[in-house]
Image (cartoon, rainbow, N blue to C red):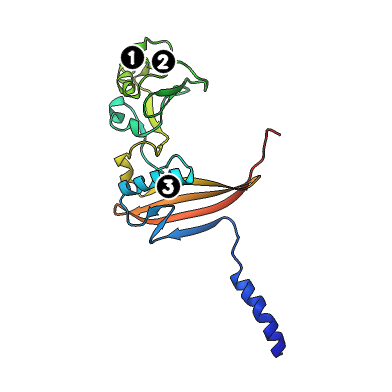
Amino acid sequence: MKKLLLLLIPAVFLFACKKDNTLPRTETTTSGSKWGIRIGSSAAEVYTQLQASAKQNNFENVDVPGQKLTFNKPEEIQQRYKFYGMINLQKGTDGASIVYDADKVTYITGAVPSPVTKWPQTEADGSAVIGNEPVDNIYNKLLAIYKLPAYTDYTITLAYKLLNKGFDPDMGNYNEWSFYIFKDIKPGLIGRNYVRLIFSNGKLKQIITEYNEFEVVNTNQ
């Protein structure tokens, strides 16, 4: 009996120390830091930390679930559009997407998702957003477009909160942000970290990281 117990002890020890590889798995951080982001930081501080983490962990944007980003007039986005990477204009099935970096308009699509040189295509250049023109022109162009009867009731939606752009103070009004970090594990397998940042009373309270793995199929073969 004594020999049997001695044999069982190593087996029990190994079982207790075995790493839990069940997926998905979740880790909640409530002190210290995770992903270079510190618990207790303000929204503006977290954003600066996110910008550094994005460079280290190879991600580009952050989402703010539930954030109001759809508006009715250009005046409502004047102070905010440069914080984002795209403007969507929509009325029913008609609309356009205007993509821009820090300096210029880089891409425009119409209602059919194919590139166009300007939008609206049928209007004079003074009343249209034109590809490659300076970002600073966008607001005044939208003011001109919205004076045209055909476009006064298009909605305006800001999209793509890119981390290479400035902090939008409105983000501080929301208690949750999120982003993804992807890591190559081996050929055909990728790891995904879905990270949620939970705020309370203006300070970061929790970092919740859900990790999962996915097979990647190469459709080019």
Residue at the (44%, 51%) spot, across then down = 196
| Disc nearest the viewer among 2 and 1 | 2
Residue on which the image places disc 1: 148
Name the side, left or right, on which 96 lies relative to 205.
right
**Residue 89, position as x, y percentages in the image:** 41, 25
Q: Which amino acid does label 3 sit on?
A: Ser
Q: What residue type is labelled 2?
A: Pro
How many numbered marks does the figure carry?
A: 3
Q: Is mark 2 on a helix, strand or loop?
A: loop
Q: Is mark 3 on a helix, strand or loop?
A: helix
- For disc 2, the neighbor class at 10 Å (few under 14, some 14 to 19, many from 20) is some
C-alpha separation, residue under disc 2 versus residue under disc 3:
38 Å
Q: Residue 120 carries which label?
A: 2
- For disc 3, the neighbor class at 10 Å (few under 14, some 14 to 19, many from 20) is some
Circles 2 and 1: CB atoms closer than 8 Å: yes
**Residue 24, position as x, y percentages in the image:** 57, 55
Q: What residue type is labelled 1?
A: Leu
| Disc nearest the viewer among 3 and 1 | 3
